[in-house]
Amino acid sequence: MILSKKIFYLILFLLPLNLGKHFIFSGSFVDGLLIDYLVPTLYVQDILIFMLLIVWVYEFFIKSERAVVPTFSQHDLTIFYFFIFSLFLSVLVAPLFNISVLTFARTFLYFLLFLYIYFNISLEKDFNIILSIFVVSFSLVSLLGIFQFIKQSSVFNNYLILGEQPYSLSTRGIRLENVFGFTKVPTYGLFRHPNIFGGLLSVILIWVISRLNASKLYFVPLCLMLSALLFTFSTMSYVSFVLGVFLYLMLTKELSGLRKYLVIILFLLFLFSLSFQSLLPNINISLLRRYQLLQGSYVLLRDHLVYGVGFNSFTIFIESVLGYMGSISFIQPVHNLFMLVLTESGIISLLFLVLIMYTSITRVRGPLLFVSLFQIVFLSFFDHYFWTIHSAHLFLWVILGLCWTIGSNYFYNK
Protein backbone atom coordinates (compact mmCIF):
# COMPACT_ATOMS: atom_id res chain seq x y z
CA MET A 1 0.00 0.00 0.00
CA ILE A 2 1.43 3.39 -1.01
CA LEU A 3 2.03 6.05 1.64
CA SER A 4 -0.63 8.49 0.44
CA LYS A 5 -3.37 5.90 0.91
CA LYS A 6 -2.12 5.11 4.42
CA ILE A 7 -2.36 8.80 5.30
CA PHE A 8 -5.83 8.92 3.73
CA TYR A 9 -7.01 6.07 5.94
CA LEU A 10 -5.52 7.80 8.99
CA ILE A 11 -7.46 10.97 8.11
CA LEU A 12 -10.69 8.97 7.97
CA PHE A 13 -9.98 7.33 11.33
CA LEU A 14 -9.25 10.70 12.96
CA LEU A 15 -12.20 12.46 11.32
CA PRO A 16 -14.10 12.97 14.64
CA LEU A 17 -11.03 14.56 16.27
CA ASN A 18 -11.66 18.11 17.50
CA LEU A 19 -8.09 19.08 18.26
CA GLY A 20 -6.77 22.25 16.67
CA LYS A 21 -5.02 25.59 17.07
CA HIS A 22 -7.39 28.57 17.21
CA PHE A 23 -6.42 31.99 15.83
CA ILE A 24 -8.41 34.84 17.37
CA PHE A 25 -8.55 38.15 15.48
CA SER A 26 -10.13 41.43 16.50
CA GLY A 27 -12.86 40.67 13.96
CA SER A 28 -13.70 37.43 15.77
CA PHE A 29 -15.81 39.46 18.21
CA VAL A 30 -19.33 40.74 17.54
CA ASP A 31 -20.58 43.27 20.10
CA GLY A 32 -17.88 42.11 22.47
CA LEU A 33 -18.77 38.41 22.14
CA LEU A 34 -16.29 35.89 20.75
CA ILE A 35 -17.99 34.06 17.86
CA ASP A 36 -16.71 30.52 17.19
CA TYR A 37 -17.49 30.75 13.48
CA LEU A 38 -15.18 33.79 13.16
CA VAL A 39 -12.19 32.03 14.75
CA PRO A 40 -10.03 30.38 12.05
CA THR A 41 -8.67 27.08 13.33
CA LEU A 42 -5.98 24.71 12.10
CA TYR A 43 -7.07 21.17 12.92
CA VAL A 44 -5.03 17.97 12.99
CA GLN A 45 -7.00 16.69 9.98
CA ASP A 46 -6.00 19.79 7.99
CA ILE A 47 -2.31 19.11 8.61
CA LEU A 48 -2.70 15.46 7.59
CA ILE A 49 -4.55 16.40 4.39
CA PHE A 50 -1.77 18.83 3.51
CA MET A 51 0.77 16.05 4.11
CA LEU A 52 -1.27 13.67 1.96
CA LEU A 53 -1.31 16.14 -0.93
CA ILE A 54 2.46 16.59 -0.76
CA VAL A 55 3.00 12.82 -0.73
CA TRP A 56 0.52 12.42 -3.60
CA VAL A 57 2.44 14.93 -5.73
CA TYR A 58 5.69 13.16 -4.84
CA GLU A 59 4.30 9.75 -5.73
CA PHE A 60 2.88 11.00 -9.00
CA PHE A 61 5.73 13.09 -10.33
CA ILE A 62 8.72 11.36 -8.72
CA LYS A 63 7.87 7.71 -8.12
CA SER A 64 4.93 7.39 -10.54
CA GLU A 65 3.02 5.29 -7.99
CA ARG A 66 -0.51 6.05 -9.11
CA ALA A 67 -3.60 4.01 -9.83
CA VAL A 68 -5.20 6.55 -12.15
CA VAL A 69 -3.57 9.22 -14.29
CA PRO A 70 -5.01 12.55 -13.01
CA THR A 71 -6.60 14.49 -15.83
CA PHE A 72 -7.82 17.58 -14.03
CA SER A 73 -9.59 18.84 -17.13
CA GLN A 74 -12.17 16.04 -16.92
CA HIS A 75 -15.53 17.49 -17.96
CA ASP A 76 -17.44 16.08 -15.00
CA LEU A 77 -15.24 18.10 -12.64
CA THR A 78 -16.16 21.42 -14.25
CA ILE A 79 -19.06 22.19 -11.91
CA PHE A 80 -16.77 21.70 -8.92
CA TYR A 81 -14.18 24.10 -10.33
CA PHE A 82 -16.82 26.76 -10.98
CA PHE A 83 -18.32 26.22 -7.53
CA ILE A 84 -14.98 26.66 -5.75
CA PHE A 85 -14.19 29.72 -7.89
CA SER A 86 -17.56 31.28 -7.06
CA LEU A 87 -16.88 30.75 -3.36
CA PHE A 88 -13.51 32.47 -3.76
CA LEU A 89 -15.20 35.47 -5.38
CA SER A 90 -17.41 35.76 -2.30
CA VAL A 91 -14.23 35.90 -0.20
CA LEU A 92 -13.29 39.10 -2.04
CA VAL A 93 -16.47 40.88 -0.91
CA ALA A 94 -16.25 39.71 2.71
CA PRO A 95 -15.89 42.53 5.26
CA LEU A 96 -13.21 40.59 7.18
CA PHE A 97 -10.95 39.31 4.41
CA ASN A 98 -8.36 37.64 6.66
CA ILE A 99 -10.95 35.52 8.48
CA SER A 100 -12.87 34.76 5.30
CA VAL A 101 -9.85 33.68 3.25
CA LEU A 102 -8.51 31.46 6.03
CA THR A 103 -11.87 29.75 6.37
CA PHE A 104 -12.10 29.35 2.59
CA ALA A 105 -8.64 27.77 2.63
CA ARG A 106 -10.05 24.80 4.55
CA THR A 107 -12.88 24.32 2.06
CA PHE A 108 -10.33 24.44 -0.76
CA LEU A 109 -8.11 21.95 1.09
CA TYR A 110 -11.03 19.54 1.49
CA PHE A 111 -11.85 19.98 -2.19
CA LEU A 112 -8.28 18.89 -3.00
CA LEU A 113 -8.89 15.81 -0.84
CA PHE A 114 -12.01 15.22 -2.93
CA LEU A 115 -9.77 15.23 -6.04
CA TYR A 116 -7.44 12.72 -4.40
CA ILE A 117 -10.37 10.40 -3.74
CA TYR A 118 -11.68 10.99 -7.24
CA PHE A 119 -8.44 9.83 -8.84
CA ASN A 120 -7.13 7.23 -6.41
CA ILE A 121 -9.89 5.44 -4.50
CA SER A 122 -11.72 2.42 -5.89
CA LEU A 123 -14.92 1.34 -4.21
CA GLU A 124 -14.29 -2.23 -5.31
CA LYS A 125 -10.86 -2.35 -3.69
CA ASP A 126 -11.11 0.20 -0.88
CA PHE A 127 -14.70 0.57 0.29
CA ASN A 128 -14.64 -2.28 2.81
CA ILE A 129 -11.53 -0.79 4.39
CA ILE A 130 -13.11 2.67 4.49
CA LEU A 131 -16.27 1.24 6.05
CA SER A 132 -14.28 -0.64 8.69
CA ILE A 133 -12.26 2.46 9.57
CA PHE A 134 -15.38 4.57 10.06
CA VAL A 135 -17.08 1.81 12.07
CA VAL A 136 -14.11 1.48 14.46
CA SER A 137 -13.62 5.23 14.77
CA PHE A 138 -17.27 6.04 15.48
CA SER A 139 -17.63 3.02 17.77
CA LEU A 140 -14.86 4.43 19.96
CA VAL A 141 -16.40 7.90 19.95
CA SER A 142 -19.80 6.34 20.72
CA LEU A 143 -18.26 4.52 23.68
CA LEU A 144 -16.91 7.86 24.88
CA GLY A 145 -20.35 9.39 24.38
CA ILE A 146 -22.03 6.68 26.45
CA PHE A 147 -19.63 7.31 29.34
CA GLN A 148 -20.26 11.04 28.97
CA PHE A 149 -23.99 10.48 29.40
CA ILE A 150 -23.48 8.22 32.40
CA LYS A 151 -21.12 10.74 34.01
CA GLN A 152 -23.20 13.73 32.82
CA SER A 153 -20.01 15.55 31.94
CA SER A 154 -16.94 15.22 29.76
CA VAL A 155 -14.81 12.18 30.54
CA PHE A 156 -11.29 13.55 30.09
CA ASN A 157 -12.31 17.15 30.93
CA ASN A 158 -9.37 18.38 28.89
CA TYR A 159 -9.58 19.87 25.41
CA LEU A 160 -6.02 18.70 24.69
CA ILE A 161 -7.10 15.05 24.88
CA LEU A 162 -8.77 14.25 21.54
CA GLY A 163 -10.33 17.73 21.53
CA GLU A 164 -13.10 16.77 23.95
CA GLN A 165 -14.59 20.01 25.21
CA PRO A 166 -14.87 20.17 29.01
CA TYR A 167 -18.46 20.43 30.20
CA SER A 168 -20.80 19.42 33.01
CA LEU A 169 -24.41 19.92 34.04
CA SER A 170 -23.58 23.39 35.38
CA THR A 171 -21.62 24.64 32.36
CA ARG A 172 -23.08 27.87 31.03
CA GLY A 173 -24.78 27.48 27.67
CA ILE A 174 -24.66 23.68 27.72
CA ARG A 175 -27.64 21.96 26.15
CA LEU A 176 -30.06 20.41 28.64
CA GLU A 177 -32.90 17.94 28.10
CA ASN A 178 -35.82 16.91 30.28
CA VAL A 179 -35.86 13.11 30.48
CA PHE A 180 -38.82 11.75 32.48
CA GLY A 181 -38.65 14.73 34.80
CA PHE A 182 -34.85 14.67 35.20
CA THR A 183 -32.48 17.23 33.67
CA LYS A 184 -29.86 15.54 31.51
CA VAL A 185 -26.97 16.71 29.34
CA PRO A 186 -26.95 15.03 25.89
CA THR A 187 -23.78 13.33 24.80
CA TYR A 188 -21.35 15.42 22.75
CA GLY A 189 -18.69 12.87 21.83
CA LEU A 190 -15.84 14.86 20.32
CA PHE A 191 -18.16 17.29 18.58
CA ARG A 192 -19.27 20.83 19.35
CA HIS A 193 -22.96 19.96 19.53
CA PRO A 194 -25.03 16.78 20.01
CA ASN A 195 -26.79 17.42 16.67
CA ILE A 196 -23.48 17.04 14.83
CA PHE A 197 -22.65 13.81 16.62
CA GLY A 198 -26.14 12.46 16.01
CA GLY A 199 -26.18 13.49 12.35
CA LEU A 200 -22.94 11.69 11.51
CA LEU A 201 -23.99 8.64 13.53
CA SER A 202 -27.28 8.44 11.62
CA VAL A 203 -25.31 8.09 8.37
CA ILE A 204 -22.61 5.66 9.61
CA LEU A 205 -25.25 3.45 11.25
CA ILE A 206 -26.68 2.62 7.81
CA TRP A 207 -23.20 1.46 6.79
CA VAL A 208 -23.15 -0.84 9.83
CA ILE A 209 -26.64 -2.18 9.08
CA SER A 210 -25.57 -2.94 5.52
CA ARG A 211 -22.96 -5.36 6.86
CA LEU A 212 -24.98 -7.20 9.51
CA ASN A 213 -25.50 -10.18 7.21
CA ALA A 214 -21.77 -10.38 6.51
CA SER A 215 -20.70 -10.70 10.15
CA LYS A 216 -22.41 -10.82 13.53
CA LEU A 217 -19.52 -8.77 14.91
CA TYR A 218 -21.20 -5.67 13.47
CA PHE A 219 -23.89 -5.96 16.15
CA VAL A 220 -21.36 -4.60 18.68
CA PRO A 221 -20.80 -1.25 16.90
CA LEU A 222 -24.52 -1.20 16.06
CA CYS A 223 -25.44 -1.28 19.76
CA LEU A 224 -22.76 1.27 20.69
CA MET A 225 -23.77 3.74 17.99
CA LEU A 226 -27.51 3.32 18.56
CA SER A 227 -27.00 4.04 22.26
CA ALA A 228 -24.90 7.12 21.53
CA LEU A 229 -27.44 8.31 18.95
CA LEU A 230 -30.23 7.93 21.51
CA PHE A 231 -28.26 9.96 24.07
CA THR A 232 -27.75 12.88 21.66
CA PHE A 233 -31.50 13.67 21.88
CA SER A 234 -31.19 15.04 18.35
CA THR A 235 -34.64 14.90 16.74
CA MET A 236 -33.52 15.44 13.16
CA SER A 237 -30.79 12.80 13.61
CA TYR A 238 -33.44 10.33 14.72
CA VAL A 239 -35.49 11.18 11.63
CA SER A 240 -32.39 10.87 9.42
CA PHE A 241 -31.63 7.42 10.84
CA VAL A 242 -35.18 6.10 10.40
CA LEU A 243 -35.30 7.61 6.91
CA GLY A 244 -31.95 6.02 6.06
CA VAL A 245 -33.02 2.55 7.22
CA PHE A 246 -36.29 2.83 5.29
CA LEU A 247 -34.58 3.99 2.09
CA TYR A 248 -31.81 1.41 2.30
CA LEU A 249 -34.25 -1.48 2.74
CA MET A 250 -36.30 -0.24 -0.20
CA LEU A 251 -33.36 0.47 -2.49
CA THR A 252 -31.68 -2.89 -1.96
CA LYS A 253 -34.75 -4.31 -3.69
CA GLU A 254 -35.11 -1.72 -6.44
CA LEU A 255 -33.23 1.50 -7.10
CA SER A 256 -33.80 2.74 -10.63
CA GLY A 257 -37.56 3.08 -10.37
CA LEU A 258 -37.44 5.03 -7.10
CA ARG A 259 -34.56 7.39 -7.82
CA LYS A 260 -36.53 10.13 -9.57
CA TYR A 261 -39.26 10.10 -6.93
CA LEU A 262 -36.72 10.40 -4.12
CA VAL A 263 -35.12 13.40 -5.80
CA ILE A 264 -38.56 15.01 -6.02
CA ILE A 265 -39.11 14.24 -2.33
CA LEU A 266 -35.80 15.94 -1.51
CA PHE A 267 -36.95 19.07 -3.36
CA LEU A 268 -40.24 19.06 -1.44
CA LEU A 269 -38.33 18.62 1.83
CA PHE A 270 -36.25 21.66 0.93
CA LEU A 271 -39.39 23.74 0.47
CA PHE A 272 -40.70 22.37 3.76
CA SER A 273 -37.47 23.32 5.54
CA LEU A 274 -38.03 26.94 4.50
CA SER A 275 -41.56 26.99 5.89
CA PHE A 276 -41.92 24.63 8.85
CA GLN A 277 -40.08 26.97 11.21
CA SER A 278 -42.42 29.81 10.28
CA LEU A 279 -45.49 27.60 10.66
CA LEU A 280 -44.58 26.57 14.22
CA PRO A 281 -42.22 29.30 15.47
CA ASN A 282 -43.48 29.48 19.05
CA ILE A 283 -43.33 25.81 20.06
CA ASN A 284 -39.95 26.31 21.73
CA ILE A 285 -37.06 28.76 21.81
CA SER A 286 -34.99 26.65 19.40
CA LEU A 287 -37.58 26.81 16.61
CA LEU A 288 -38.12 30.50 17.28
CA ARG A 289 -34.42 31.23 16.89
CA ARG A 290 -34.18 29.15 13.71
CA TYR A 291 -37.17 31.01 12.28
CA GLN A 292 -35.61 34.38 13.08
CA LEU A 293 -32.27 33.40 11.54
CA LEU A 294 -34.12 32.35 8.40
CA GLN A 295 -35.98 35.66 8.33
CA GLY A 296 -32.64 37.42 8.81
CA SER A 297 -31.32 35.61 5.72
CA TYR A 298 -34.18 36.98 3.64
CA VAL A 299 -33.39 40.51 4.84
CA LEU A 300 -29.70 40.15 3.95
CA LEU A 301 -30.53 38.74 0.51
CA ARG A 302 -32.45 41.87 -0.49
CA ASP A 303 -29.18 43.66 -1.18
CA HIS A 304 -26.77 40.74 -1.60
CA LEU A 305 -28.53 38.18 -3.80
CA VAL A 306 -25.87 37.99 -6.53
CA TYR A 307 -22.60 38.00 -4.58
CA GLY A 308 -23.75 37.34 -1.01
CA VAL A 309 -22.49 39.07 2.13
CA GLY A 310 -19.13 37.32 1.90
CA PHE A 311 -17.77 33.86 2.61
CA ASN A 312 -18.15 32.96 6.33
CA SER A 313 -19.64 36.40 7.06
CA PHE A 314 -23.22 35.56 8.06
CA THR A 315 -22.59 35.98 11.80
CA ILE A 316 -21.05 39.42 11.21
CA PHE A 317 -24.31 40.80 9.79
CA ILE A 318 -27.03 38.83 11.56
CA GLU A 319 -26.77 40.64 14.92
CA SER A 320 -27.70 44.02 13.43
CA VAL A 321 -30.44 42.44 11.31
CA LEU A 322 -32.03 40.67 14.27
CA GLY A 323 -31.85 43.89 16.28
CA TYR A 324 -33.56 45.75 13.45
CA MET A 325 -36.29 43.10 13.37
CA GLY A 326 -36.73 43.25 17.14
CA SER A 327 -35.76 39.57 17.38
CA ILE A 328 -33.86 37.62 20.00
CA SER A 329 -30.10 38.09 19.79
CA PHE A 330 -28.65 34.74 18.65
CA ILE A 331 -25.44 34.91 16.67
CA GLN A 332 -25.28 31.71 14.63
CA PRO A 333 -25.42 30.81 10.94
CA VAL A 334 -28.87 30.17 9.51
CA HIS A 335 -29.82 26.53 10.14
CA ASN A 336 -30.04 25.57 6.47
CA LEU A 337 -26.84 24.84 4.56
CA PHE A 338 -28.25 25.90 1.21
CA MET A 339 -29.66 29.16 2.56
CA LEU A 340 -26.31 29.81 4.24
CA VAL A 341 -24.39 29.35 0.97
CA LEU A 342 -26.93 31.57 -0.81
CA THR A 343 -26.68 34.33 1.80
CA GLU A 344 -22.89 34.27 2.07
CA SER A 345 -21.81 33.48 -1.50
CA GLY A 346 -24.77 34.43 -3.69
CA ILE A 347 -27.15 32.82 -6.13
CA ILE A 348 -24.46 31.53 -8.53
CA SER A 349 -22.73 29.53 -5.79
CA LEU A 350 -26.06 28.09 -4.68
CA LEU A 351 -26.90 26.99 -8.23
CA PHE A 352 -23.54 25.20 -8.57
CA LEU A 353 -24.01 23.55 -5.17
CA VAL A 354 -27.49 22.34 -6.09
CA LEU A 355 -26.15 21.03 -9.40
CA ILE A 356 -23.34 19.19 -7.59
CA MET A 357 -25.76 17.57 -5.14
CA TYR A 358 -28.25 16.68 -7.84
CA THR A 359 -25.60 15.19 -10.13
CA SER A 360 -23.98 13.31 -7.24
CA ILE A 361 -27.19 11.75 -6.01
CA THR A 362 -28.24 10.68 -9.50
CA ARG A 363 -24.89 9.32 -10.69
CA VAL A 364 -24.13 6.85 -7.88
CA ARG A 365 -25.92 3.59 -8.63
CA GLY A 366 -25.44 1.52 -5.50
CA PRO A 367 -27.90 2.13 -2.65
CA LEU A 368 -25.53 2.73 0.28
CA LEU A 369 -23.79 5.91 -0.89
CA PHE A 370 -27.07 7.07 -2.40
CA VAL A 371 -28.73 6.83 1.02
CA SER A 372 -25.74 8.48 2.74
CA LEU A 373 -25.83 11.49 0.44
CA PHE A 374 -29.63 11.64 0.71
CA GLN A 375 -29.31 11.80 4.52
CA ILE A 376 -26.64 14.51 4.35
CA VAL A 377 -28.77 16.66 2.04
CA PHE A 378 -31.81 16.08 4.25
CA LEU A 379 -29.93 17.09 7.41
CA SER A 380 -28.53 20.13 5.60
CA PHE A 381 -32.06 21.44 5.12
CA PHE A 382 -32.35 21.84 8.90
CA ASP A 383 -28.81 22.66 10.05
CA HIS A 384 -25.52 24.12 8.85
CA TYR A 385 -22.83 21.90 10.36
CA PHE A 386 -21.94 20.07 7.12
CA TRP A 387 -20.68 23.46 5.95
CA THR A 388 -19.42 25.17 9.10
CA ILE A 389 -17.96 22.40 11.31
CA HIS A 390 -14.67 20.94 10.12
CA SER A 391 -15.36 17.24 10.84
CA ALA A 392 -18.81 17.23 9.24
CA HIS A 393 -17.57 19.36 6.32
CA LEU A 394 -14.72 16.90 5.76
CA PHE A 395 -17.18 14.00 5.88
CA LEU A 396 -19.30 15.71 3.20
CA TRP A 397 -16.33 15.99 0.82
CA VAL A 398 -15.32 12.37 1.50
CA ILE A 399 -18.82 11.15 0.61
CA LEU A 400 -18.84 13.29 -2.53
CA GLY A 401 -15.44 11.87 -3.47
CA LEU A 402 -16.70 8.30 -3.06
CA CYS A 403 -19.74 9.11 -5.19
CA TRP A 404 -17.61 10.58 -7.97
CA THR A 405 -14.45 8.48 -7.94
CA ILE A 406 -13.47 7.32 -11.41
CA GLY A 407 -11.72 4.32 -9.88
CA SER A 408 -15.00 2.92 -8.57
CA ASN A 409 -17.27 0.11 -9.58
CA TYR A 410 -20.61 1.83 -9.06
CA PHE A 411 -22.44 -1.43 -8.51
CA TYR A 412 -20.16 -2.43 -5.64
CA ASN A 413 -21.44 -0.06 -2.94
CA LYS A 414 -24.35 -2.21 -1.98
Image: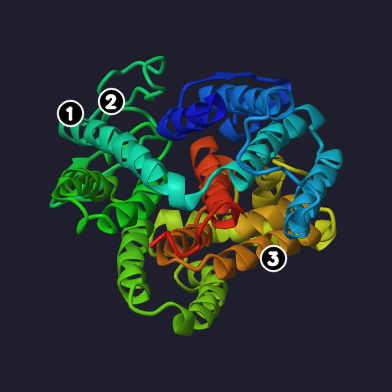
Q: Do the residues labelled 2 and 1 touch (CB within 8 Å)?
A: yes
Identified at 28% across, 27% down, the residue is 168
Say whether residue 384 is visible: no
Local packing at callout 1 (Cα closer than 10 Å; few below 14, some 14-19, many 20+) is some
Identified at 56% across, 24% down, the residue is 48
**Amino acid type, mark 1:** Lys
Give the image quarter of residue 252.
bottom left
Identified at 69% across, 41% down, the residue is 312
257 left or right of 348? Answer: left
Q: Which type of secondary structure does the marked residue at label 3 adopt?
A: helix
Local packing at callout 2 (Cα closer than 10 Å; few below 14, some 14-19, many 20+) is many
Residue 384 percent location from the top left of the image: 55, 50
- The mark nearer the N terminus, 3 or 2, is 2
Q: What residue would you read off at disc 3?
A: 355
Q: Nearer the viewer, residue 404 or 47?
A: 404
160 left or right of 365? Answer: left
Q: Distance between the residues labelled 2 and 1?
A: 7 Å
Q: What residue would you read off at disc 2?
A: 154
Residue 390 percent location from the top left of the image: 54, 36
Up/down of 276 relative to 410, above or below: below
- The mark nearer the N terminus, 3 or 1, is 1
Q: What residue would you read off at disc 1?
A: 151
Q: Which type of secondary structure does the marked residue at label 2 adopt?
A: loop
**Amino acid type, mark 2:** Ser
Q: What's the image's color scheme?
A: rainbow
